Image (tube, rainbow, N blue to C red):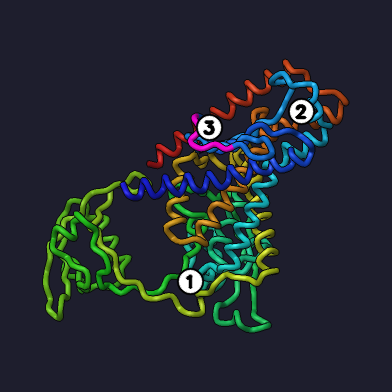
């Protein structure tokens, strides 16, 4: 329940910030174009706070925090006194109206740059994208990894962290091939480090984000430090807790066979659902034997596996793989702008791949997934929360630019038609477009919500 309220609170904060940035973009440009703004509202429904400013605008915070709006004087909506007619939105030139409408999405892109700028100034603890193996029957199987290799570029795009690798790979879903540039980890400090570029055949690459990441699905083995079989965590009400296993116990054998590695132990557990297994443990220098019955649980593939509810102790990451991703005052702005551009490009690519079928509509996420992401990123710290809201801000800007009549992009489409033809789109045509756009948007929202509930 605490996680629920934390996610909900983080979602409201994130959405409130993004909506304010978006609507302020409309508001600021409208005022500069001489349009009278009657109301600036964050949220819909009943007002929980309101104030009339010296500029005559009513500022409102409403009860339902799922959107916002800027109400401008408009003769198409209400009667306007003759003395205020020149301040009406509809009286402005078509280019002024285009500027006002496009200012919202542009404000979202600017906000993303600001959020990432602060994030890079603070610095983000990061790990270098190092692989130590590949899966033979996978696109990456052609890479022969003799020693740890760091991925330094994906199809020519430089990458420094696993997050950047992930983002770059997502942008190439559906492409027939992907190039990975690798360098031995031990030589990365050298000025003339040897690199090699490998072309992966991804024509048959199947990636389901519900089950795995693009990194794993390509067959790349992520380097992880060694595992100590000393128990670091015992889940509450788990089979391990019921059997009396405690934190600090060291796994010595399973079913009489000496412990070899953690993966082998997990394999035995997962194939023993509802079947009793014997674990030999060392506790305070004494050897004890414990019978445990792994509880049955379904994995992401729908298969029944056994779970005992323990985690081992993981060795610390090597110093040469850890670093703080941070920049100076000027370089932070350059990095933030570049990252925002990358997010914009990847987002447009993903929308295109939805239409081509390379990406399934099952990948659409709604408010529940966003709330979960907001809560998770906020729990990790400010820098992660800033990165998350920058991503959502970019997506909000792009979605609003889609040429659906109920969105900013739909209004812009009508205005550009007006620029070309020299006259406004007829009101009846606009009304039909708004109905069609609203129906399509509701359908997309319905699919996204269905996906959210399916994930729950």
* Residue holding disc 3: 44
Answer few, some or many: residues within 10 Å of disc 3's Cα (few below 14, many 20 plus, some between 14 and 19). some
Disc 1 from disc 3: Cα separation: 52 Å
Q: Quadrant of residue 308?
A: bottom left
Is residue 198 among the parts visible in the rendering?
no
Kindly state the secondary structure of the residue where label 2 is placed.
Answer: loop
Q: Quadrant of residue 270?
A: bottom left
Q: Nearer the viewer, residue 224 or 99?
A: 99
Q: Nearer the viewer, residue 315 or 251?
A: 315
* Residue holding disc 2: 88
Answer few, some or many: residues within 10 Å of disc 2's Cα (few below 14, many 20 plus, some between 14 and 19). some
Query: Residue shown at 60%/39% (left/top)?
Result: 354
Q: Is residue 88 above or below residue 378?
A: above
Q: Nearer the viewer, residue 247 or 222?
A: 247
The percent position of residue 255, horizontal first and vertical second, equals 17, 66
Q: Nearer the viewer, residue 275 or 311?
A: 311
Kindly state the secondary structure of the residue where label 3 is placed.
Answer: strand
* Residue holding disc 1: 132
Cβ–Cβ under 8 Å for marks 1 and 3: no
The percent position of residue 205, horizontal first and vertical second, equals 55, 51
| Residue 275 part of the magenta segment | no
Query: Residue shown at 19%/60% (left/top)?
Result: 240
């Amino acid at each position: 329940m605490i996680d629920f309220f934390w996610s909900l609170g983080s979602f409201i904060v994130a959405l409130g910030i993004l909506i304010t940035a978006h609507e302020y973009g409309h508001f600021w440009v409208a005022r500069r174009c001489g349009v009278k703004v009657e109301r600036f509202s964050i949220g819909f429904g009943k007002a929980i706070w309101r104030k009339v400013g010296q500029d005559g605008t009513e500022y409102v915070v409403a009860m339902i925090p799922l959107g916002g709006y800027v109400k401008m004087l408009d003769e198409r909506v209400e009667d306007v006194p003759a003395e205020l007619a020149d301040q009406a939105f509809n009286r402005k030139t078509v280019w002024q109206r285009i500027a006002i409408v496009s200012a919202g999405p542009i404000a979202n892109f600017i906000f993303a740059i600001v959020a990432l700028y602060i994030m890079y100034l603070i610095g983000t603890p990061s790990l270098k994208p190092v692989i130590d193996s590949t899966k033979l029957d996978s696109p990456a199987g052609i890479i022969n990894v003799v020693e740890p290799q760091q991925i330094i570029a994906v199809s020519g795009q430089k990458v420094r962290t696993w997050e950047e690798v992930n983002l770059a790979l997502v942008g190439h879903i559906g492409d027939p091939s992907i190039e990975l540039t690798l360098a031995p980890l031990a030589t990365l400090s050298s000025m003339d480090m040897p690199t090699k570029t490998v072309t992966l055949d991804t024509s048959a690459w199947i990636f389901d984000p519900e089950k795995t990441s693009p990194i794993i699905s390509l067959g790349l083995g992520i380097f992880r430090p060694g595992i100590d079989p000393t128990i670091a965590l015992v889940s509450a009400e788990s089979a391990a807790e019921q059997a009396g296993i405690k934190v600090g116990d060291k796994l010595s054998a399973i079913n009489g066979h000496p412990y070899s590695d953690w993966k082998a132990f997990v394999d035995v557990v997962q194939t023993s659902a509802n079947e009793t297994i014997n674990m030999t443990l060392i506790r305070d220098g004494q050897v004890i034997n414990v019978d445990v019955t792994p509880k049955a649980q379904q994995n992401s593939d729908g298969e029944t596996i056994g779970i005992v509810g323990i985690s081992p102790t993981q060795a610390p990451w090597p110093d040469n793989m850890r670093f703080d991703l941070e920049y100076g005052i000027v370089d932070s702005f350059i990095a933030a702008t570049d990252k925002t551009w990358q997010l914009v490009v990847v987002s447009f690519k993903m929308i295109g791949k939805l239409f081509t079928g390379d990406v399934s509509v099952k990948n659409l996420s709604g408010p529940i997934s966003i709330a979960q992401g907001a809560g998770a990123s906020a729990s990790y710290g400010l820098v992660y929360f800033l990165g998350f809201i920058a991503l959502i801000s970019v997506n909000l800007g792009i979605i609003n630019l889609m040429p659906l009549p109920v969105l900013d992009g739909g209004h812009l489409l009508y205005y550009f038609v007006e620029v070309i033809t020299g006259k406004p789109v007829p009101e009846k045509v606009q009304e039909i477009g708004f109905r069609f756009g609203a129906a399509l948007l509701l359908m997309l929202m319905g699919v996204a919500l269905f996906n959210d509930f399916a994930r729950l």
